Amino acid sequence: MSVRSQSLENLRVSLASNVKHYRSIKSISQERAALEAGIDRTMLSKIERGITNPSLDTLLKLANYLEVSVSDLLKEGSTR
């Protein structure tokens, strides 16, 4: 399924899974990842739980920090 055809809920679920996956590859805590990416830790927690819609700015900060593209963060099944 392409990013275009995903529902908003599916995007949040994919984003949550992918952010957790890429963060775990770096073996970094949520707190440290949020600090180093320049976002609030509670925002990162909400993203990883799939309960918020982060801004494009936040997505870009996370992608840059995790050294992946924004589309990688949104891809369905990319970490499975």
Image (cartoon, rainbow, N blue to C red):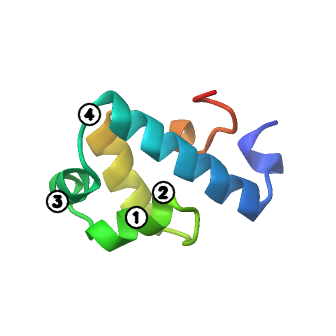
**Residue receiving disc 2:** 48
Mark 4 closeness class: few <14, some 14–19, many ≥20 residues within 10 Å: few
**Residue receiving disc 1:** 45
Type of amino acid at the residue the image marks with label 1: Ser
**Residue receiving disc 3:** 35
Mark 1 closeness class: few <14, some 14–19, many ≥20 residues within 10 Å: some
Instruction: State if disc 4 and disc 2 touch (CB < 8 Å).
Output: no
**Residue receiving disc 4:** 27
Could you tell me residue 11's position as x and y percent?
A: 68, 54
Residue drawn at x 73%, y 63% is 8
Instruction: State if disc 2 and disc 1 touch (CB < 8 Å).
Output: yes
Q: Circle 2 sits in a helix, a strand or a loop, which is it?
A: helix
Marks 4 and 1, how far apart at CA? 16 Å
Task: Identify the mark nearer the N-term, 2 or 4.
Answer: 4
- For the C terminus, which image quadrant? top right
Instruction: State if disc 4 and disc 3 touch (CB < 8 Å).
Output: no
| Label 3 vs label 4, nearer the camera | 4
Name which quarter of the figure residue 61 lies in. bottom left
Is 8 positioned to the left or the right of 60 in the image?
A: right
Residue drawn at x 24%, y 50% is 33
Marks 1 and 2, how far apart at CA? 5 Å
Mark 2 closeness class: few <14, some 14–19, many ≥20 residues within 10 Å: many
Instruction: State if disc 3 and disc 1 touch (CB < 8 Å).
Output: no
Task: Identify the mark nearer the N-term, 2 or 3.
Answer: 3
Q: Circle 3 sits in a helix, a strand or a loop, which is it?
A: helix
Could you tell me residue 32's position as x and y percent?
A: 17, 52
Question: Can the viewer see residue 57?
Answer: no
